Amino acid sequence: MQGACLGPQTIREASQIFADLAILGACGVDSAIGVTALDAAEAEVRGTRLGQSSLLVIAATSEKLGRVAPFKIADPTRIYHLIVEADAGDLSAFEAMDVKVHCASASGERQGLRR
């Protein structure tokens, strides 16, 4: 993975940082499986960052929703805010888990909560 900070030193350094909020991208976000990545080392770093944070925010494009990548980062119940495109489709499964779903528009206008 070109340009990524991965490996044992990254894990050690990430474990020293405590954050109220982790904002992560994901290769897959599924309401049953959770947040996933395509690369094991990337999943490990993101999992460490999540473990040091109180809240998880996931930003995902429509093609990542419902997709499951090979390496798990977090259960779906760990997601606090899910930021998606306005045309993301049915996200009621996330909303049923009390995930706060936010829709972003292409124009940059704020759409707010779906509920």
Image (cartoon, rainbow, N blue to C red):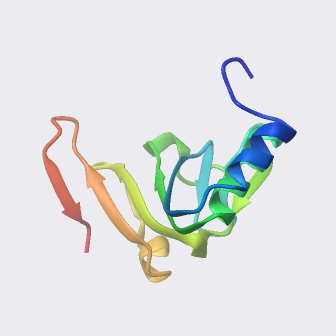
Tally the numbered discs.
Answer: 0
Instruction: Please identify the quarter of the rendering in which residue 40 is found.
Output: top right
Most extreme residue toward the top, as rendered?
2
The answer, for residue 88, to whether it is visible in the render is: no
Location of residue 31 in the rendering, given as x and y in whole percent from the top left corner:
58, 67
Location of residue 17 in the rendering, given as x and y in whole percent from the top left corner:
62, 55
Instruction: Please identify the quarter of the rendering in which residue 52 is found.
Output: bottom right
**What residue lies at 74% left-to-right and 38% top-to-bottom?**
38
Q: With 5 as the anchor, is 44 left or right in this view?
A: right
Location of residue 35 in the rendering, given as x and y in whole percent from the top left corner:
64, 57
Instruction: Please identify the quarter of the rendering in which residue 74 is found.
Output: bottom right
Q: Quadrant of the N terminus?
A: top right
The answer, for residue 92, to whether it is visible in the render is: yes
Q: Quadrant of the C terminus?
A: bottom left
**What residue lies at 48% left-to-right and 71% top-to-bottom?**
94
Q: With 39 as the anchor, is 35 left or right in this view?
A: left
- Of residue 16 and residue 101, the one placed in the foreground of this image is 16
Q: Please, is residue 39 above or below residue 101 in the view? A: above
Q: With 94 as the anchor, is 27 left or right in this view?
A: right
- Of residue 66 and residue 18, the one placed in the foreground of this image is 18
Most extreme residue toward the right, as rendered?
8
Location of residue 113 in the rendering, given as x and y in whole percent from the top left corner:
24, 67
- Of residue 54 and residue 106, the one placed in the foreground of this image is 54
**What residue lies at 20% left-to-right and 62% top-to-bottom?**
112
